[in-house]
Amino acid sequence: MAFTATILLLGSGELGREFVISAKRLGCYVVACDSYDNAPAMQLADAREVFSMLDADRLRAAVDKHRPDFIVPEVEAIRTEVLADLESAGTTIVPSARATMMTMNRDGIREVAAVDLGLRTSRYRYAETLEEVRAGAAHTGLPCVIKPVMSSSGKGQSTVRAEADLAAAWDYAVANMRGDRARVIVEEFVDFDYEITLLTVRTREGVLFCPPIGHRQERGDYQESWQPAAMSEAAIAAAQDMARKVVDDLGGYGLFGVEFFVKDDDVIFSELSPRPHDTGMVTLISQDLSEFDLHARAILGLPIPAITSHGAAASAVILADRVSETVRYEGLAEALATPGSAVDVRIFAKPTTRPYRRMGVALARAETTDDARRIAAEAAGKVKLHYDKA
Ligand SMILES: Nc1ncnc2c1ncn2[C@@H]1O[C@H](COP(=O)(O)OP(=O)(O)OP(=O)(O)O)[C@@H](O)[C@H]1O
Ligand SMILES: NCC(=O)N[C@@H]1O[C@H](COP(=O)([O-])[O-])[C@@H](O)[C@H]1O
Ligand SMILES: [Mg+2]
């Protein structure tokens, strides 16, 4: 068939949805996979498969059926041993099977960064029992942050300020982790001035960086992001140096979201996604090419002559507040009419809601990042979710 390439997308949320658009524009055939039907990326893809990507047999069956040129993971929770086998047999895993294995669990990437590469990270310990959690907290000191090694978007994460709260944090982590391995990382709480995502593109021609993205998180999940984040040249250089080391170690081609905490000029590596990053959705309005276009080009081996910035920009999330099997969006016209130099909205069209589930994002460009943040938040606030009765 007359397609540029066949891509099997593992995970079909909002990030996958925008990636499908970028890949389709370049003539790819995309099969979108996720554990539930009508996931955001499926609505735009050429074909879909609904199965748990932790199920090795189903994953292999999907690969046998579609014979992809590229397998593009969009979530962490994937049976990554299967990806390693497929890579050995000649299928390209994006960015590499090693990158997906090392980032599926927090302990993997932490060992690469802190031990193998000697990057500056927070103090940490792993724990598999409450006793080990107590020992971990004694090592890091309080406050500390406790996270399941297998989770994302802040699920199961809590900050503990008093020893008496360690047991509740352990229980919360175990109750909200993914997978069946009760293991957490206990991290020193970093009292950072600000935190950033450095979008880093590994291409055949070398490593490229987007301007740093600042963001604000609540409950371990991103609420708003802006670009460029104000940063000293020294801090940018330190972050770029660390990002380059990690992506070169993980290997392959694609875009990575590398997360750092910054305190004064001290830049501390936190973690990374070997794929587009939620805070990077701001690039849908801030730059040519967006993080999704960059991922697609890097994967396909297409040139990236320049990453052009359109100036200060921001994104603000639109969240659900309850469990519902149906949802409608209202206020789109009002949101898009928000005064500002450029305002846009992305509606993810997720079929169901739950408290804090990200359902859309508002985007704005303005003279300053402060103005862009204000306008994006105002536009996001105008989009109202209407929960129909089932
Ligand atoms: N050690 C720490 N000290 C201070 N804040 C922290 C620490 N670890 C995490 N946080 C805060 O919690 C947020 C989420 O943490 P982290 O990125 O590790 O979780 P995540 O579940 O992988 O999130 P995502 O998948 O959205 O990237 C961070 O962006 C930061 O704001
Ligand atoms: N921080 C990771 C992240 O933002 N991942 C994005 O959220 C989706 C899951 O959303 P859901 O939980 O609403 O289904 C994922 O598929 C991905 O697009
Ligand atoms: Mg993170």
Image (cartoon, rainbow, N blue to C red):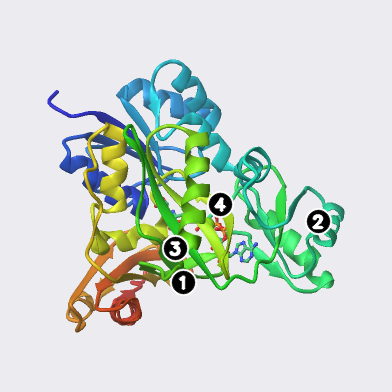
Q: Nearer the viewer, residue 290 or 306?
A: 306
What amino acid does circle 1 point to?
Answer: Arg
Residue annotated with mark 1: 322
Residue annotated with mark 3: 233
The spot of residue 145 in percent (x, y) is 69, 63
- State the separation of the CA atoms marked 3 and 4: 21 Å
What amino acid does circle 3 point to?
Answer: Glu
Please report the residue visible at 25 percent of the width from the left and 47 percent of the height from the top: 293
The answer to whether mark 1 and mark 2 are in CB contact below 8 A is no
Please report the residue visible at 28 percent of the width from the left and 40 percent of the height from the top: 296
Residue annotated with mark 4: 271
Please report the residue visible at 57 percent of the width from the left and 38 percent of the height from the top: 102
Is 227 situated above or below 151?
Answer: below
Precedes in sequence: disc 3 or disc 1: 3
Mark 4 Cβ inside 8 Å of ligand 1 = yes
The spot of residue 187 in percent (x, y) is 70, 58
